[in-house]
């Protein structure tokens, strides 16, 4: 019987050692003699020195013929293994001139330890995994099958962590101390956390294990319990994050080389829509499947918001263990996740009376305030404030949620969840509510009430209002839109490992829950209550591509972040195409979120020498405004003053007449203005500007001026100058011209200049 590690190694990695197939514990073809060896065959392993010597002998022996060396589990990770024996073979040998070369035999070392497996491959040839798909005649792969060469599965159900925020109160050293936190999202008993003494990351760090999670009803704050030997200040960072990716590759280069860390060479001779990550893509076919839409893609990212969230019913609640069990008919169990709230859908435990006005902030991330959304004479912008608890300068996200006098709100709603339930404010498709945690309540003298909600922007923040799908549903002076709402009880899920099927714990239909303010009250979970785990109401939307750079040394090469070139003989339609959503503003108003698909297509926030550099020749235009919808202006902001909106100047071109229209503080040039056909102070264009050196016959007291081009009418001003002294008057203005009358006859060689302005 072969060692299990050897059989698994050959079965999984399939090294080219003459193995045809694995069946149970034995192979259908015997392993070649001398190819697979145990380290113990090369000497005693009783001491580290003996084991290291045995390794040297094994590498020397196998280096002559190649093979696989098995290191026993008891020594895995303890030996200094540097698999450098494989070298270059020259033909003929030196000192003759080399005509050809190859690699000498290589050794593969397998360390199968208690915690992981380490494979040391030959340094020149590495490891190769090969597959040939050549099925029998009259066969094909099954219906819409996926048949990857290597499949890696990584299921993350329990144990990983993602939390970072600021302590809300000082904590003294001792046992079972309470650490008050702004949000319980991401916390659970048993996890490890780094809790700094503070402020921020300074003055030492505690490697704490969370003993329990609690809720302080008096302070209306969550806390965790842990032991500490440090003194922590408010504003200290508390954090821990787990990196549990599927593939981790490290390459450290101390030797000159040109390297492809990941290289894919795709030779495409038949069609089939294709997705590839960094590659050489060599194609001869049309690639595109006849009715498919994928074509060939060297890099592709598809980002979807998921809406099929968990829906179920309470079977039982066991608060001593902070657990809830749901019924077998619950749906979408696979969509459960830690750190999203579980909402009680029992309408008897909801608050729905009255209406709310939601006042938007002009921006939820910028402190701009033009007074655009004033409500009862006051605007509610986002602004930078000093957190009174932590002392940290942070953004206070703006807006306002005001309930009318019929809203029966009391401090008990703090910690529950608010959703706007107007039809247009539910998610498209599944119609999910967006649930926001209520963080504060203010009772106004007129009977109205103001609440704030939890939003996340580099930490948990108490915010003024949610982002509505349509600003039309927002309220401001002269535009009041009362909205229907729901406030429901609920709390964060902190353990789904007993609910997700699989393993020893999975499939028990049990959720771990964080303690919360309504626990043990009439608003608590009870058997029969309908449930849903909320979707993320306020996502940081995923970015398909991110490049951040930390260049500290200037260079000569004009290196771009995106380098796009077409070196072929055929033209491409565009270097960048931006699509999605309607192409007109009228169409955008019909979307669920009633605005265009993009707030901005290109944003340049960094100072640069040139914002847009057009260096090439352009057959048609360097910048083309097609104006298929509305007129497309260019705008500038000026006159910036603290606390005041900027003034705006705009340049546009009429879709009908092609006229430039400038609105702003005026026009100034540092050079001449040439080729002007006319000057008009009204919307009616002038077709004529001036005439010069018009001859006047000697003795005449009247001259008629005819325009080169007729005016629209006779409503224009005339300015005249002449070459002799006399009084004059302009008479008989028509669209075709005007007359000038003099009180002294014109002398010989008299000349006249004229100009008109509409």
Image (cartoon, helix red, strand yellow):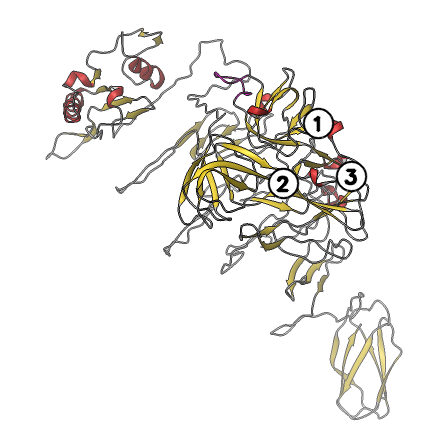
Q: Tell me if residue 648 is in the magenta stretch.
A: no
- Span colored in magenta: 498-507
Foreground of the two, 21 or 413:
413
Foreground of the two, 684 or 723:
684
Q: Are marks 2 and 1 in contact (CB under 8 Å)?
A: no
Provide the secondary structure element on which disc 3 rests.
loop
Q: Where does residue 243 sit, x and y in percent of width and height?
A: 44, 34
Q: Which residue is mark 3?
A: 408
Q: Is 707 drawn above or below residue 540 in the view shown? A: below
Question: Principal SS element in the magenta part?
Answer: loop
Marked residue nearer the N-terminal end (2 or 3) = 2
Q: Where does residue 214 sit, x and y in percent of width and height?
A: 56, 34
Q: Tell me if residue 503 is in the magenta stretch.
A: yes
As drawn, the label of residue 345 is: 1
Q: Are marks 2 and 3 in contact (CB under 8 Å)?
A: no
Q: Is residue 543 left or right of 6 when viewed as pictured?
A: right
Q: Where does residue 558 sit, x and y in percent of width and height?
A: 41, 54
Residue placed at 50% from the left, 30% from the top?
189
Identify the image quadrant of the C terminus. Answer: bottom right
Q: CA distance from mark 2 to mark 1?
A: 26 Å
Q: CA distance from mark 1 to mark 3?
A: 19 Å
Q: CA distance from mark 2 to mark 3?
A: 21 Å
């Amino acid at each position: 019987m072969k060692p299990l590690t050897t059989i698994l190694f050959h079965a999984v990695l399939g090294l080219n050692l003459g193995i045809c197939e694995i069946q149970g514990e034995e192979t259908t073809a015997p392993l070649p003699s001398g190819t697979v060896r145990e380290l113990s065959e090369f000497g005693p392993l009783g001491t580290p020195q003996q084991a290291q010597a045995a390794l040297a002998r094994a590498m020397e022996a196998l280096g002559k013929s190649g093979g696989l060396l098995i290191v026993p589990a008891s020594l895995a990770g303890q030996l200094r293994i540097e698999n450098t024996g494989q070298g270059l073979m020259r033909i003929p040998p030196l000192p003759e001139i080399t005509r050809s070369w190859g690699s000498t035999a290589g050794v593969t070392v397998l360390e199968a330890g208690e915690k992981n497996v380490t494979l040391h491959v030959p340094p020149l040839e590495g490891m190769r995994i090969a597959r040939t798909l050549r099925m029998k005649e009259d066969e094909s792969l099954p219906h819409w099958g996926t048949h990857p060469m290597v499949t890696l599965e990584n299921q993350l159900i329990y144990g990983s962590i993602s939390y970072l925020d600021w302590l809300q109160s000082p904590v003294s050293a001792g046992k079972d101390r309470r650490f008050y936190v702004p949000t319980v999202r991401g916390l659970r008993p048993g996890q490890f956390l780094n809790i700094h003494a503070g402020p921020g990351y300074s003055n030492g760090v505690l490697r704490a294990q969370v003993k329990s999670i609690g809720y302080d009803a008096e302070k209306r704050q969550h806390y965790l319990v842990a032991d500490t030997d440090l003194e922590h200040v408010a504003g200290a960072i508390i954090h821990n994050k787990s990196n549990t990716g599927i593939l981790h590759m490290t390459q450290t280069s101390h030797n000159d080389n040109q390297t492809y860390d990941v290289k894919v060479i795709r030779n495409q001779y038949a069609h089939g829509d294709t997705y590839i990550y960094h590659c050489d893509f060599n194609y001869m076919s049309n690639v595109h499947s006849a009715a498919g839409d994928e074509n060939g893609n060297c890099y592709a990212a598809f980002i979807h918001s998921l809406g099929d969230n968990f829906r179920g019913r309470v079977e039982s609640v066991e608060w001593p263990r902070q657990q809830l069990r749901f019924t077998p008919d619950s749906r979408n169990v696979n969509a459960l996740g830690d750190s999203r709230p579980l909402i009680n859908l029992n309408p008897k435990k909801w608050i729905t009376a009255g209406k709310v006005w939601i006042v938007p902030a002009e921006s939820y991330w910028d402190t701009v305030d033009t007074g655009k959304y004033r409500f009862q004479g006051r605007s509610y912008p986002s602004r930078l404030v000093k957190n009174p608890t932590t002392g940290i300068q942070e953004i206070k996200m703006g807006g306002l949620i005001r309930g009318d006098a019929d809203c029966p709100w009391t401090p008990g709603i703090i910690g529950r969840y608010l959703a706007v339930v107007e039809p247009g404010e539910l998610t498209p498709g599944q119609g999910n509510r967006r649930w926001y945690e209520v963080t504060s309540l203010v009772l106004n003298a007129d009977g109205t009430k103001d609440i704030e909600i939890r939003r996340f922007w580099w930490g948990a923040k108490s915010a003024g209002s949610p982002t509505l799908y349509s600003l039309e549903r927002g309220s401001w002076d002269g535009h009041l839109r009362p909205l229907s709402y729901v406030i429901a009880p609920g709390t964060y899920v902190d353990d789904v490992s007993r609910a997700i099927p699989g393993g020893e714990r999975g499939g028990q239909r049990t959720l771990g829950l964080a303690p919360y303010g309504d626990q043990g009250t009439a608003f608590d979970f009870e058997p029969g209550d309908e449930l849903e785990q909320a979707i993320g109401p306020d996502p940081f939307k995923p970015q398909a591509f991110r490049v951040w750079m930390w260049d500290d040394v200037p260079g000569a090469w004009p290196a771009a972040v995106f380098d796009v070139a077409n070196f072929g003989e055929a033209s491409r339609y565009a270097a960048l195409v931006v699509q999605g959503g309607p192409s007109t503003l009228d169409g955008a108003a019909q979307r669920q979120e009633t605005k265009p698909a993009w707030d901005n297509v290109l944003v340049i926030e960094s100072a640069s020498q040139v914002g847009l550099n057009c260096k090439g020749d352009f057959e048609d235009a360097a910048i083309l405004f097609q104006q298929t919808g509305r007129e497309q202006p260019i705008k500038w902001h000026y006159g910036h003053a603290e606390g005041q909106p900027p003034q705006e100047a705009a340049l546009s071109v009429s879709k009908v007449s092609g006229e430039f229209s400038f609105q702003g503080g005026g026009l100034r040039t540092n050079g001449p203005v040439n080729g002007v056909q006319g000057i008009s102070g009204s919307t009616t264009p002038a077709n004529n500007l001036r005439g010069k050196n018009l001859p006047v016959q000697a003795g005449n007291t009247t001259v008629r001026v005819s325009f080169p081009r007729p005016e629209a009418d006779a409503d224009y001003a005339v300015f005249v100058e002449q070459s002799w002294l006399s009084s004059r008057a302009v008479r008989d203005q028509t669209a075709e011209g005007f007359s000038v009358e003099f009180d002294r006859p014109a002398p010989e060689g008299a000349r006249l200049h004229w100009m008109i302005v509409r």
